[in-house]
Each structure stands twice: as C-alpha cells, then as structure tokens.
Image (tube, rainbow, N blue to C red):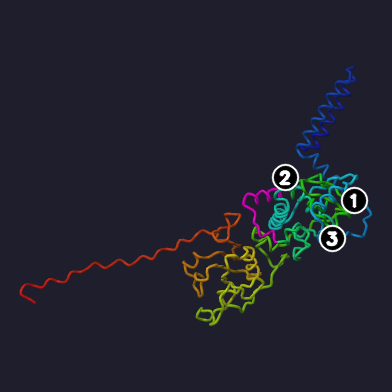
Amino acid sequence: MADRDLYHLTHDAIVGAIKQADTKGVRAGPIIALCLIAALALGVWAWSAGWLSQAFDGVRQSAVDDYSISVPTNVPTVEPLELKEVPVEIAKKINDATPFTKEPVPPAAPFRIAGSATDIARATDCLAAAIWYEAGAETLAGKKAVAQVVLNRVRHPAYPKSVCGVVFQGQERATGCQFTFTCDGAMARVPGVEAWAQARGLARIMLNGEVFKPVGVATHYHTDWVLPAWSAKLDKVHKEATHLFFRWTGFWGTPAAFRGRYAGVEPAVQKLIMLSPAHAQVDADDAVIGDVPPLDPTLGVPGADGQMPPGTPPVGNGVPANAYGFKPRLQSPSGDFIAFVVPKTTDPSQLLGLVLASCSVKPYCKVLVWTDNRRAPTKMPVTDDQLAAMAFSYLRNRSNGLDKVLWNCDVFPRPDPTQCMKQRVVPTPVAPAAKPAVAPPVPAAGTL
C-alpha cells in the first residue's frame, strides 16, 4: 500500500472513531489523545521510511526553483585566490575578530547526481580529490563541509556546471586556482588505497543527497591562518576545525540564487588520470581539462629494417619532442604502437598524459614504457625479456571495448593493486640434451 494511501486511511479511521464515540455518548477526549499518539507514531515511521524527508526536500527545492523571484543581473565575479601578505598571527587575529553573520543560515538543497556511468565516476573522483587534498586531515564533518562547498558552486550561476569544472577551475594557472591543490604541486602526493577509497565513498554519499547543513550555501572557505583578499567582502557563516566558511552577500548568498542546473556531463581531467580510470578513457567528443598537444608522428619512426635512424639521440634524457620532452623509442608506421623510455623519476601522471597525446581518438592503440634504456626494444618484435622489464602499458581496442592501463608497481607504486601488472616470468632456455657417447667399433680379431 502506498504511503499516501496509508495516511488517508489512518485519517479516515480516526475521524470515524471520533464520530462513532460521540453517537454512543462516549467521551472523545481519551480517544483523540490516543489518535494523536497514533498519528505521531505514523509520522515518525513515515520520516524514517524517507517519504516525509523527500517531501520536504521537494518543498525546499521548489523554493529554490521559484522563477517568479526577481533575479539580479549582476552575477558576482569569481576572483582568483590571492592571499594578503600578513604574518600568520595577524591573519588569525583578523579572522577571529571577523563576526559571523546574524542572518539565518538555511541549509542547501540535496544534490542528487544523474548521468552516464563514466560521468558519475568522473564527478565522484573529482569530488574525492577535493575532499582528500583539501581536508584529508580533517574530521568527517570537515570533509563534508568542503564537499558541500563544491556542490553549492555547481548550482551557483557564477561557477561551472560540472563537479570537475568547479574543482579544477583555474588549474592552468601557476597560482590563483580556485582549489589550491590543483595548481600548487600538491597532486604529486598520491593518497593511499584506504584513504582514497574512503574519500570516494564520502563523495558518492554527498552526490546522492547528503547535506552538511552548518555551512548552508557557502561557496568559499579558507584556513584561519591565511587572509584571502575576498574574505572581507563575504558573510562568514561557519567554522569547522581550522576552516572558515563564507557565502556571497545579498541575494547571491540566498538559496534562491542557487538555481543553476547541473550539466550532466563531466570533462576528463588530465591531472586525475593517475588516480581515476574514468579520466583516462577519453572519447572524441569529450571535453578535456589540461590536454596536451599530440606527438609529432614523424619522430622516432624506425626504418624498414626496424632500426632507428643513425644518430638518433637517446630517449628520456630531455630531448624536446612533445609536452613532456619524450621522443618515441620505437613506433609503428601506422602510429598505433609506440614505445617510450623515460626516467624512473618521471611523474606517473605524465605517462597517462603520453597516452592521451599518443592515442588521441585512435580505435586501436598500444603504448609501452620502459625506464631501463638497456632493456628497452629498438626493433620489432618485442622479446619476452624486454616485456618483463616494462614499467607501464596501455592498450585500447574499441572493437571489443578494451581500455586497459597497467603499471609495474615496483617502479611506479599505485594506490589500487588492480592497476599493477603481473610480473612476467621469462622462461629459462633449456640447453639441448647431449648426445650419448658412441663407443668406437671393436675391430675384429686379426684386423688392424
């Protein structure tokens, strides 16, 4: 029976019981009290079942979507993060002295993501990255607060309409990106397996309706020992551990302003492909944040005998050939098989960048990488011994849906063990069996 049918049935039963009691001269007071208790119990049950909470979510969202509200045309400008150069002690004193707003801080409406499996996976990993890099050392509340700010921005007209677009806004700058971890080199640190799994789990919860109410519709935050240029222009609404949270002033800081519609599609982020397979799989029509120019297909092409041209310089030693300075060591004429040699100190994210640059939208592509120049191939075919020394491999075959990235985790440790290639066992050559010795014939008696 539907929840609403049960409600109406209970209501009719209560009214009927009261009327029947009146006709029989029974006092209605105790019956009304019992009925109210029953109604209260029914309400608690309905809330726990999720029906009433969903109904309130709908009312709250309807208030946000009330397009009869006059919306100002001056959408606020998103400023790059610039910090005032003041000592830490002074910054903390100024931050502590800044009062919290006396206006109400209503919670944001729940955000429930929808889209393709790839887009949802990309959004999850972008939000997980913001949670881990921005609040990895914070409590659960601190992590939720940061995630709530990201989702608030997705809905605000001043910001991009995708989770990844919000998190990596301004990542191309050397400084001044919206979330500092995207441009200050922090992503050279890789979260551990358990930490990354926890961040992704919380991201999934936040993307499916969880709301961290204390921050309301805050769109900004900073730690209490720095002083951004914009902090004095916004309303201070909450403090969570060392993070201070702010919202726009006036209309743009009210729930009615957060009417932006989620785009439903997510760009692939180059800086995340070392952590997220969903960001390593790029189709021709996908938007890409942080793309790199393609390789020159004429570089490093071997001759008809499979040998590299005489005088070809060693690879992986700073020879400028593409965005990362790596020339192909070996490449098929069609360009669907490419081998590189790179230093062991190479940032693992650059290897996936090489995949994007090398394979582009080719239906079939194979990229192999070595870190030992002596054990890398110089001609086809690649031997078993050379394959055993491989540090990274990528294989795409659109005809059967294959898109596989594997790492030699002894060279490039990964947070996910399923991304590690199995160590190849090179068969030991078996020496041919020695032929049994044959004794010379014994000469017959009387012969020499």
Question: Relative to residue 58, is residue 368 depicted above or below?
Answer: below
Q: Answer with left or right where residue 232 lies relative to residue 162.
A: right
Task: Tell me which amino acid carries mark 3.
Answer: Val
Q: Answer with left or right where residue 443 lies relative to residue 119.
A: left
Q: Callout 2: few (<14), some (14-19), or many (20+) C-alpha neighbours within 10 Å?
A: few
Q: Answer with left or right where residue 189 lies relative to residue 70.
A: left
Q: Residue at x 77, y 61 (%)?
A: 177
Q: Which residue is mark 2?
A: 140
Marks 1/3 in contact by CB < 8 Å: the verdict is: no
Q: Residue 187, located in which quarter of the rendered image? A: bottom right
Residue 170 is tagged as none
Residue range corresponding to the magenta coloring: 185-204
Kindly report which numbered mark, 1 or 3, lies closer to the viewer in this rendering: 3
Q: Which residue is mark 3?
A: 78
Q: Which residue is mark 1?
A: 66
Label 2 vs 3, first from the N-terminus: 3
Label 2 vs 1, first from the N-terminus: 1
Q: Position of residue 101 (x, y in %)?
A: 89, 46
Q: Residue at x 87, y 49 (%)?
A: 98
Q: Callout 1: few (<14), some (14-19), or many (20+) C-alpha neighbours within 10 Å?
A: few
Marks 2/1 in contact by CB < 8 Å: the verdict is: no
Q: Position of residue 398 (x, y in %)?
A: 61, 65
Q: CA distance from mark 1 to mark 3?
A: 25 Å
Q: Secondary structure at mark 3?
A: loop
Q: Secondary structure at mark 1?
A: loop
Question: Relative to residue 209, is residue 31 depicted above or below?
Answer: above
Residue 187 on the magenta segment: yes
